[in-house]
Image: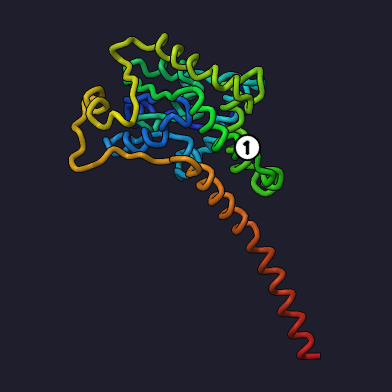
Amino acid sequence: MSLNREVDKLTAIIPRPVEMQVLSLGLSRTATMTMFTALNKLGYNSYHMLAAVIEPRSKADRHLLCWREALNYKVHGIGEPYSPADFDKILQYHSAVTDMPCVNFSKELIERFPNAKVVLTQRDPESWVKSVDNSIIYILSWRIWKLLRYIDPDFLLPFRDCVQLSTEDWTSPAPYYDHQALASYMPKHVAYIKSLVPPDNLLEFHPRDGWEPLCKFLGKTVPANEPFPFVNRGQDVANIVKMGIGKKLIKFSIPYLVGIGAVVVSWHLAKTWY
């Protein structure tokens, strides 16, 4: 493999810092943030697209650039493929995964972590497409990405690319915003995961089922006085991304605003002095 790949810049720690124990392989917008939160409450260190965005170690290791490389090869055949061992390097500090882009490499993760328990969340295709349309496709449609391509090419741009490539992976060769292609992918994904995992190592789960079936499957004690978490409803994900973009724009603008302020102050002082 080429040493120019982002993943080749990461060092594999042997033995692995933590054992990978849970693969939650439902598609994005099937309660993946809820699963991320629930698994963390059960003591796992879970990985979600959010982790690649906000975790200091994931940001320092440039996970978004790694995922973009892996997705570019899978979707467009650009670059070189990532192996199961490559994904292990990215995820080596985590004991559970959920959400895109991990779910886009379900086969590789199942192969790399055969002893991990697999949880599968799903939704009715029609309601799922509506949710994807109101969140993922809506986010990708923002015109501000054209500006951010120049302002933040190493973080926000790879984030957008990963989201689009992950969704394209589900609809290809149709475009990522094709509702019919999306709807047809949900049952294909569910059938695919079932074909890869022995029935006794797979839990088909819905958050409305609560803690009991999940904890029984994972061998965990049901949290006392802790309601099952329900997070990231409706526009939550879009609002989170908007906040992130807003912070980045403010940070980018401060030097220019300070410069403009200095010019204005200097002009007023010049008028006073001269």
Extreme residue in the right direction: 274
Q: In the rendered view, would you say 80 is above or below 32?
A: above
Residue 167 placement: quadrant: top right
Residue 164: x percent and y percent?
A: 61, 31
Given the image, on which type of amino acid does mark 1 rest? Answer: Leu
Residue 204: x percent and y percent?
A: 34, 20
Q: In the rendered view, would you say 31 is above or below 180?
A: below
Front residue of 133 and 94: 133
Front residue of 193 and 9: 193
Residue 179: x percent and y percent?
A: 60, 24
Extreme residue in the bottom direction: 273
Q: Left of 112 or right of it: where is 5?
A: right
Residue at image position (36%, 39%) is 230
Helix, strand or loop status at disc 1: helix
In this rendering, the count of numbered labels is: 1
- Residue corresponding to mark 1: 140
